[in-house]
C-alpha cells in the first residue's frame, strides 16, 4: 500500500519548495483529480493543491450518478449526451465496485414532461448515443409492469414507465481513488493547501504561493504550467490572474435530502416529474433513500451554501406528490447536502436551462481554467485540457510523453472482472464477517466504497481486535471495524479530521448518520493517539463536526426559509 498520509506533511511540504514541476493543478475535486491522474500517467511531473479536503467542493455533493443526462436531450445537447453516455461504461470498468449499475424507472403520468412516444424515442436515442447494448437497452413498461417494479407509484395517474440503465457512485470516493491512483503514478497531492497568489516570470505564470490551512505557513512552488480546476471558485482565480473577462461562471444550487429507508421504502431508483415541470431523482441506498435535486441561482458565500426550509419543503412536496402513500415531513429528514454547479453563464437562460458542457479558458499569462461539465465526464475533461497544455510544450518534451491512457488505468481498489465479481466478493466478506456478529451491510459498505482495499481494512481490524478485545456483540465489533476504516484513511487517504472521515471518506454523515454519535469519542481518541493532532485542533474539529451534523440534519422551523 502506498503511504498517503498527513503524518508526512512537513517532509512533503519541504520537498515541494525545492522542486520544479511541469504542472500545478488547483482543486482536488473530480476535475482536478482526473487531470492529476492523466498528467502523471502521460509522464508529467505534477502536483495538485486543494484548499480544503479532497472533494470538499461540489464533488461530494452531486446526485452521485454516473449518467448520460437524459434530460439534456430535451435541450438538444446531443454531443454532451453522447460523450457522458459513453463515458459511463468506461468509468464503470475503471472501478466496478464503486460505479455500480443502477436501473432507473421513469414513470409516465398524465400531463408529465415526457409522453409515452417521446420517452420511447428519447430513450432509444439515448441508447444509440451512449452505445448501450444487451440487457441494458431501454424497455417500455405498461402500468402493471411499472407497478410491479415500484408499487409506491401513483396508481391512479400512472400510464406506464420507461426503464433504462445508469450507474451510481460515491462522488467523493471516486475523487479520492483518482487522486490515490495519480499518486501511485508519481503525482504529488496535498489537501488543506490554498493557492493564494500566482508567481510570474516575464509576464507568464511560473508557479503559485500556497497557504497551508493547517499551520498557516506560506511557501512557493514553481511549475511551467498551471491548470485551475477550482469548480465554483474558477472565476476567483481568474480574477487573481487579472484574466476574468468574456465568459463567466453561473452558479446554481442543488439540494438533496436523506430519509431513513423505512420512511421512503422505494424498491428502486425513480426519475420522476414534479409539478413545476422539472424532474428529480429518488434513490434507495442501503439504510436510506435520498432525493434531489433543486436547481436555483446562487450568489452567496461559496464556502457556505445552505439548505433552506424552502428547498426542503419543495423536495418533500415533490416526493409526496409522486408517491401518494408516502407522507414525508421535515422532521423525517435525517441528513442532507447542498452543492454548487459551476456552469457557464448564458444570457437570458434560467438555471435549469444552462448547458452542462465544459469550457476551457486560457489567459494571456498562461493560466488554463476548466469549468462546467459533469462528474461523469471528468476523464474526457482532463484529456481535453491537458492536450491544450501539451500543445504548448517544447517538441522534445512533447515527444517524450505518453498519450492519454486513463481509459485503461484501473482505479485503486479495483481488481474485479465485472459487477458479478464485485457481488461475489461482497457475499464472501459477508460470510466472513458473520462470525464477528457483523451484517451484510458492513460487507456491502466496505466493498462498494473500497473494493479490494476492504482486505487492508480487515487486516487492520484483525490486529486491533487483538488489542481492544471487543465484547461478543454487534456494537462492539462494528465500532472496531469503523476504527479500522479510519486508520486506513489516516494511513492511506490523507484523512486530516473527523469531518474528512465521516463525510468524504466513509459517507457516514449522509448514509449512516447514527453511526457518528456512537463512535465519535473512540474516533477522537484514535486521532489523539496518532500524535499529529493537538488537543486544541481536535477540539475545534469536534465542534466543526457537531456543527455539520446540526446543519445537515436539523430541519426545525428555526432554519432560514430562503437562502
Ligand atoms: P469541485 O468539486 O468544486 O472542485 C473544485 C475544488 O477546488 C474544490 O474542492 C475547492 O475547494 C478547490 N479550490 C478552490 N479554490 C482553490 C484554491 N484557491 N486553492 C486550492 N484549491 C481550491 N454530475 C454527474 O455526472 N452526475 C450527477 O449525478 C451530478 N449531480 C449533480 C448534482 C448537484 C446538486 C450538483 C451541484 C452537481 C451535480 N453534478 C453531477 C455535476 C458534478 O458534481 C460537477 O460537475 C463536479 O463535481 C465538479 O467538479 P470540480 O472538480 O470541477 O469542482
Image (cartoon, helix red, strand yellow):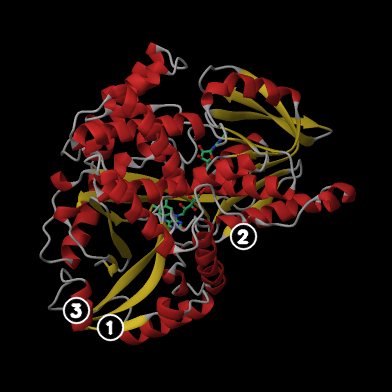
Dividing the picture into quadrants, the one containing residue 172 is: top left
Q: Is residue 121 left or right of residue 282?
A: right
**Tally of numbered discs:** 3
Say which of marks 3 and 2 sits in front.
2
Q: Nearer the viewer, residue 368 or 259?
A: 259
Nearer-the-camera pick, 408 or 476: 476
Secondary structure at numbered mark 2: helix
Q: Nearer the viewer, residue 113 or 541?
A: 541
SS assignment at label 1: strand
What is the distance, in whole Å, between disc 1 and disc 2 at their CAs? Answer: 34 Å
Residue 414 place in picture, x, y as percent: 51, 52
Q: For the C terminus, which image quadrant?
A: top left
Earlier residue among tags 3 and 2: 3
Question: On residue 141, which mark appears?
Answer: 1
Which is more N-terminal, label 2 or label 1? 1
Whether ligand 1 has any atom under 8 Å from the Cβ at mark 1 is answered as no
Residue pointed to by mark 3? 158
Q: Residue at x 41, y 35 (%)?
A: 459
Q: Nearer the viewer, mark 3 or mark 1?
A: 1
Above-or-below relation of 548 to 136: above
Give the residue pinned by disc 2: 407
Label 3 to label 2: alpha-carbon separation: 41 Å
In the rendered image of this protein, does residue 119 appear above or below residue 412? Answer: below
* Pointer 2 residue Cβ closer than 8 Å to ligand 1: no
Amino acid at each position: 500500500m502506498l503511504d498517503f498520509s498527513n503524518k508526512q506533511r512537513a517532509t512533503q511540504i519541504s520537498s515541494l519548495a525545492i522542486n520544479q514541476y511541469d504542472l500545478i493543478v488547483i482543486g482536488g475535486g473530480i476535475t482536478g483529480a482526473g487531470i492529476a491522474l492523466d498528467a502523471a500517467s502521460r509522464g508529467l511531473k505534477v502536483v495538485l493543491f486543494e484548499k480544503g479536503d479532497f472533494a470538499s467542493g461540489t464533488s461530494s455533493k452531486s446526485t452521485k450518478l454516473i449518467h448520460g443526462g437524459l434530460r439534456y436531450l430535451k435541450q438538444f445537447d446531443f454531443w454532451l449526451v453522447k460523450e457522458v453516455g459513453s463515458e459511463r461504461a468506461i468509468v464503470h470498468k475503471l472501478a466496478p465496485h464503486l460505479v455500480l449499475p443502477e436501473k432507473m424507472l421513469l414513470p409516465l403520468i398524465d400531463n408529465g414532461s415526457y409522453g409515452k412516444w417521446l420517452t420511447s424515442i428519447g430513450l432509444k436515442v439515448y441508447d444509440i448515443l451512449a452505445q448501450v447494448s444487451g440487457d441494458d437497452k431501454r424497455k417500455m413498461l405498461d402500468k402493471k409492469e411499472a407497478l410491479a417494479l415500484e408499487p409506491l407509484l401513483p396508481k391512479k395517474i400512472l400510464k406506464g414507465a420507461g426503464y433504462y440503465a445508469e450507474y451510481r457512485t460515491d462522488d467523493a470516493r471516486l475523487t479520492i481513488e483518482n487522486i490515490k491512483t495519480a499518486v501511485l503514478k508519481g503525482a504529488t497531492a496535498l489537501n488543506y493547501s490554498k493557492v493564494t497568489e500566482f508567481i510570474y516570470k516575464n509576464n507568464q505564470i511560473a508557479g503559485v504561493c500556497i497557504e497551508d490551512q493547517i499551520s498557516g505557513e506560506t511557501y512557493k512552488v514553481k511549475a511551467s504550467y498551471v491548470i485551475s480546476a477550482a469548480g465554483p471558485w474558477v472565476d476567483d482565480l481568474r480574477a487573481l490572474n487579472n484574466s476574468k473577462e468574456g465568459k463567466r461562471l453561473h452558479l446554481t444550487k442543488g439540494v438533496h435530502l436523506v430519509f431513513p429507508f423505512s420512511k421512503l421504502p422505494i424498491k428502486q431508483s425513480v426519475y420522476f416529474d414534479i409539478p413545476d415541470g422539472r424532474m428529480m431523482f429518488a434513490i434507495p441506498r442501503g439504510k436510506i433513500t435520498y432525493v434531489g435535486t433543486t436547481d436555483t441561482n446562487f450568489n452567496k458565500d461559496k464556502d457556505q451554501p445552505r439548505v433552506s426550509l424552502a428547498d426542503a419543503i419543495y423536495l418533500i412536496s415533490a416526493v409526496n406528490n409522486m408517491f401518494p402513500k408516502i407522507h414525508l415531513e421535515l422532521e423525517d429528514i435525517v441528513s442532507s447536502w447542498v452543492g454548487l454547479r459551476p456552469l457557464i453563464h448564458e444570457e437570458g437562460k434560467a438555471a435549469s436551462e444552462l448547458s452542462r458542457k465544459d469550457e476551457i479558458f486560457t489567459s494571456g499569462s498562461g493560466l488554463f481554467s476548466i469549468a462546467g461539465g459533469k462528474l461523469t465526464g471528468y476523464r474526457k475533461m482532463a484529456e481535453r485540457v491537458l492536450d491544450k497544455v501539451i500543445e504548448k510544450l517544447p517538441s522534445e518534451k512533447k515527444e517524450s510523453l505518453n498519450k492519454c491512457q486513463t481509459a485503461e488505468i484501473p482505479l485503486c481498489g479495483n481488481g474485479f472482472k465485472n459487477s458479478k465479481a464485485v457481488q461475489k466478493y461482497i457475499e464472501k466478506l459477508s460470510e466472513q464477517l458473520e462470525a464477528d456478529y457483523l451484517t451484510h451491510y458492513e460487507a456491502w459498505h466496505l466493498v462498494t466504497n473500497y473494493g479490494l482495499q476492504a482486505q487492508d481494512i480487515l487486516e487492520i481490524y484483525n490486529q486491533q481486535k487483538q488489542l481492544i478485545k471487543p465484547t461478543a456483540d454487534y456494537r462492539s465489533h462494528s465500532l472496531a471495524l469503523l476504527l479500522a476504516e479510519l486508520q486506513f484513511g489516516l494511513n492511506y487517504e490523507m484523512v486530516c479530521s473527523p469531518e474528512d472521515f465521516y463525510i468524504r471518506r466513509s459517507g457516514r454523515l449522509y448514509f449512516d448518520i447514527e453511526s457518528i454519535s456512537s463512535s465519535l469519542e473512540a474516533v477522537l481518541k484514535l486521532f489523539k493517539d496518532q500524535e499529529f493532532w493537538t488537543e486544541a485542533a481536535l477540539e475545534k474539529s469536534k465542534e466543526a463536526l457537531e456543527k455539520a451534523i446540526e446543519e445537515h440534519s436539523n430541519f426545525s422551523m428555526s432554519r432560514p426559509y430562503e437562502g
